[in-house]
Image (tube, rainbow, N blue to C red):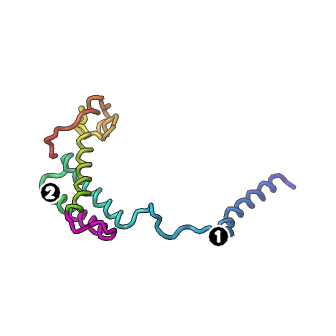
Amino acid sequence: MDPLLIGLLVVAAAVVFFVVEPLVSGLRAPSGLDEDEPSEEDFRKRAVLLALRDVEYDYHTGKLDDADYRLLRAQLSREALETLRNGAEVTGVLEGSDEAADDPIEAEIRRIRSSMKKVAPCAACGVTLAPGARFCGDCGARVTEEEKGATPDEGEGG
């Protein structure tokens, strides 16, 4: 027999084996959510909190004025509070206290604000540098060690 034909038969047999083996062994893919998988409520909560983070970032980088910032923050805070309340009611966490629902939102806002204080403007063009950046994303200038350790003025919108 030809060695090429033998090789093709071995490859064909391997392919057939890997296709048929799961069917014969009875293995099935899980159809429900695992404990580690986020629920739809978790996705909604994350989306609202990320939107709040983006509004904070846009405000601190000067992309939003005070009026727009206050309006967007109020709307997103209400939505986040409603989402957190719905999630807490589902899990039985909320015990009739509005403060219990406010704490996660305020903690997330404090975390975002503290991370924003760790960025500095580029010495060459003034664009806000990304945390840990070695080069400016706008002009390409090298970030100095002083810029890496610098923080913007505390009075700036915060």
Question: Which badge, 2 or 1, comes first in the chain's sequence?
Answer: 1
Q: Is mark 1 on a helix, strand or loop?
A: loop
Under mark 2, the amino acid is Arg
Kindly identify the residue that appears in the image at 29 percent across and 56 percent down: 50
Residue 136 drawn above or below residue 75: above
Residue 104 figure quarter: bottom left
Mark 2 sits on what residue? 70
Residue 112 drawn above or below residue 99: above
Asked if the stretch drawn in magenta spans residue 115, the answer is no
Q: What element carries label 2?
A: helix
Query: Are there few (<14), some (14-19), or many (20+) residues within 10 Å of tag 1?
Result: few
Task: Quadrant for the N terminus, please.
Answer: bottom right
Q: Tell me, for residue 94, which label it has, or none.
A: none
Kindly identify the residue that appears in the image at 81 percent across and 55 percent down: 6
Nearer the observer, disc 2 or disc 1?
1
**140 left or right of 17 in image:** left
Q: Which of 142 and 111 is in front in this view?
A: 111
- The magenta-colored residue range is 78-98
**22 left or right of 104 in image:** right
Calculate the distance from the C-alpha at mark 2 to the C-alpha at mark 1.
57 Å
Mark 1 sits on what residue? 26
- Most extreme residue toward the right is 1
Q: Position of residue 126 (x, y in %)?
A: 22, 37
Q: Which of 73 and 14 is in front in this view?
A: 73
Under mark 1, the amino acid is Gly
Query: Are there few (<14), some (14-19), or many (20+) residues within 10 Å of tag 2?
Result: some
Residue 121 figure quarter: top left
Q: Position of residue 45 (x, y in %)?
A: 31, 62
Q: Position of residue 114 (x, y in %)?
A: 24, 44
